[in-house]
C-alpha cells in the first residue's frame, strides 16, 4: 500500500513578507495548486491514503477558495483516505464545519487518541492533537497492535525531554519501544528522518512549498510503500515544490564598482541550482574598500529580471587602512582623519561613517 505523508502546507498564507501584492496573490494560489498536484500524483501513482500531519492551513480564518478547494478534493476522490491532524496554525474547526456531512474518506482526530485501520487491519494509523488540554497525551498512548504496521501521527517539536509548559514538545524517548513502525511528524518545515528504537523510523516530511528564505532548498512529501504481508517499509522523499528558494553567498572581496560586484555575483549564480522561476537571496561577503562604488538597488533590479524574486543582503566588511589617508590633503582626507581621531565614535561605526561620507563627497546616493 502506498501512503503519502505531508505536513505544514500552510494554505492561505499571506506570502507578503518578501513579495509585492500581485506576486503574493500568485504565490498564494501556487501553494493551493501544489496541493492539488499532490492529489493528482496520488491518483496517477495508486496512493491509497494521505497523512496530513498538521498545519494544513495557515490561520484560523480560512478563505472560501481554500476551503472549497480542499473540501472538494476530498469529496471527489473517495478512493483516497485523508487523515487530517490539526496543528497549531489550523486549530479551529472552520474547515471541518464547511462539510454538510463528513465523508467516509476523511479521518479526523481530537485531543483523545484515535486509531483507524487500513488494509483489513494490517496497517493502523493512530494520532492525537496535542494541546494544553491534554498535557499527558503521550503518556496515555494506547498499546499498539504488535501484529500490525503501526503509524503514529503527531504535530510538534521532538525533544529528549518532556515539557509541562509547552504541549507541542514531543519527548521522543517516551515513544521508543512502543511498537511504532513509522512516526509521521509535522511542525518542522524541512525533511528529516531518523531511527526510532528499536525498529521504527520517525520523519518530518517538511512543507510542500517554501515560503520564506528560512525555508530554502527542496520541499515536498514522503512516499511510503508498505508491504502489507511482510510489514516492510520503503520510503522516498519526493521533491514537489513548484518554486524553490535559495540563499547564495558571493565573495566580492576586492571589487571597486557595481559592475565588478555583478560579475562576482554572476559567478556564484552560475554554479547554483537556482532557476529563473525560483526566489533567490544573494548575500554579499568579503572585504571592500571604503571607496567601492556599490549600488545594491541596481544589483537587485538586475537580478529581478532573471528570477521570479531576488533580494540582496550585504554582509561585506569595509577595509580601511588609516595610512592610505595620512598624507591626503584633500577634503576627503581631512574627513577620514577627523572620523578616525574621534573618541566619541565607536570603532565599529567609523568605517561605515567614512563610507557614507565618501559617497556624499563623490556626489553619490548614500546607501545605509
Image: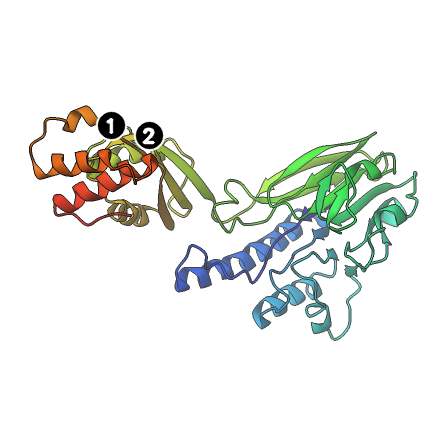
Which of the two labelled residues, at mark 2 and mark 1, occupies the earlier sequence position? 1
Q: Quadrant of the N terminus?
A: top right
Label number found at residue 212: none
Is 350 left, or right, of 178 in this rendering? left
Q: Where is residue 44 in the image (x, y as percent from the top left)?
A: 63, 50
Residue 1 in sight:
no
Of 5 and 8, the residue lying toward us: 8
Question: What residue sits right under mark 1 in the picture?
Answer: 254
Residue 277 in sight:
yes
Q: Give the farthest residue toward the top.
A: 323
Is 38 left, or right, of 147 in this rendering? left
Of 17 and 310, the residue lying toward us: 17
Q: Give the farthest residue toward the bottom.
A: 100
Q: What element carries label 1?
A: loop
Image height check: is 86 above or below 225?
below
Q: Is mark 2 on a helix, strand or loop?
A: loop
Image height check: is 254 above or below 348?
above
Q: Position of residue 6 (x, y in %)?
A: 66, 49
Which residue does the image show at 23% across and 44% down from the upper left?
295
Q: Where is residue 313 in the image (x, y as percent from the top left)?
A: 36, 43
Is 236 left, or right, of 309 in this rendering? right
Question: What residue sits right under mark 2 in the picture?
Answer: 286
**Image quarter of residue 296:** top left
Of 310 and 31, the residue lying toward us: 310
**Image quarter of residue 206:** top right
Which residue does the image show at 47% across and 48% down from the upper left?
243
- Whole-angstrom CA distance, mark 2 to mark 1, is 8 Å
Q: Do the residues labelled 2 and 1 touch (CB within 8 Å)?
A: yes
Amino acid at each position: 500500500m502506498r501512503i503519502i505523508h505531508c505536513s505544514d502546507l500552510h494554505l492561505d498564507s499571506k506570502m507578503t513578507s518578501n513579495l509585492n501584492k500581485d506576486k503574493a496573490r500568485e504565490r498564494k494560489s501556487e501553494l493551493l495548486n501544489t496541493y492539488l498536484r499532490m492529489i493528482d500524483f496520488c491518483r496517477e501513482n495508486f496512493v491509497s491514503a494521505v497523512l496530513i500531519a498538521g498545519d494544513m492551513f495557515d490561520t484560523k480564518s480560512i478563505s472560501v477558495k481554500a476551503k472549497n478547494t480542499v473540501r472538494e478534493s476530498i469529496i471527489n476522490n473517495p478512493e483516497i483516505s485523508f487523515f487530517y491532524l490539526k496543528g497549531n496554525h489550523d486549530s479551529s474547526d472552520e474547515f471541518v464545519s464547511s462539510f454538510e456531512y463528513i465523508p467516509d474518506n476523511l479521518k479526523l482526530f481530537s485531543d483523545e487518541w484515535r486509531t483507524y485501520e487500513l488494509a483489513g487491519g494490517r496497517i493502523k494509523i493512530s494520532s492525537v492533537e496535542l494541546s494544553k488540554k491534554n498535557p499527558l497525551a503521550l503518556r496515555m498512548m494506547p498499546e499498539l497492535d504488535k501484529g500490525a504496521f503501526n503509524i503514529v501521527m503527531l504535530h510538534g517539536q521532538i525533544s529528549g525531554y518532556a515539557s509541562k509548559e509547552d504541549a507541542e514538545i514531543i519527548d521522543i524517548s517516551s515513544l521508543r519501544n512502543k511498537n511504532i513502525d513509522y512516526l509521521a511528524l509535522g511542525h518542522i518545515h524541512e525533511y528529516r528522518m531518523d531511527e526510532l528504537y528499536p525498529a521504527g523510523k520517525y520523519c518530518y516530511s517538511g512543507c510542500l512549498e517554501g515560503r520564506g528564505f528560512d525555508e530554502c532548498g527542496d520541499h515536498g512529501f514522503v512516499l511510503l510503500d508498505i508491504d502489507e504481508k511482510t510489514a516492510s517499509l520503503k520510503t522516498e522523499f519526493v521533491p514537489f515544490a513548484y518554486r524553490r528558494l535559495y540563499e547564495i553567498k558571493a565573495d566580492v572581496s576586492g571589487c571597486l564598482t557595481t559592475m565588478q560586484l555583478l560579475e562576482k555575483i554572476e559567478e556564484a549564480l552560475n554554479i547554483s541550482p537556482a532557476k529563473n522561476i525560483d526566489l533567490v537571496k544573494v548575500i554579499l561577503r568579503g572585504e571592500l574598500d571604503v571607496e567601492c562604488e556599490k549600488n545594491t538597488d541596481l544589483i537587485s533590479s538586475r537580478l529581478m529580471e532573471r528570477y521570479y524574486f531576488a533580494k540582496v543582503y550585504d554582509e561585506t566588511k569595509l577595509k580601511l587602512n588609516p595610512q592610505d589617508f595620512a598624507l591626503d590633503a584633500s577634503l576627503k582626507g581631512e574627513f577620514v582623519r577627523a572620523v578616525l581621531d574621534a573618541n566619541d565614535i565607536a570603532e565599529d561605526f567609523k568605517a561605515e561613517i567614512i563610507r557614507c561620507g565618501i559617497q556624499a563627497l563623490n556626489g553619490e546616493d548614500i546607501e545605509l
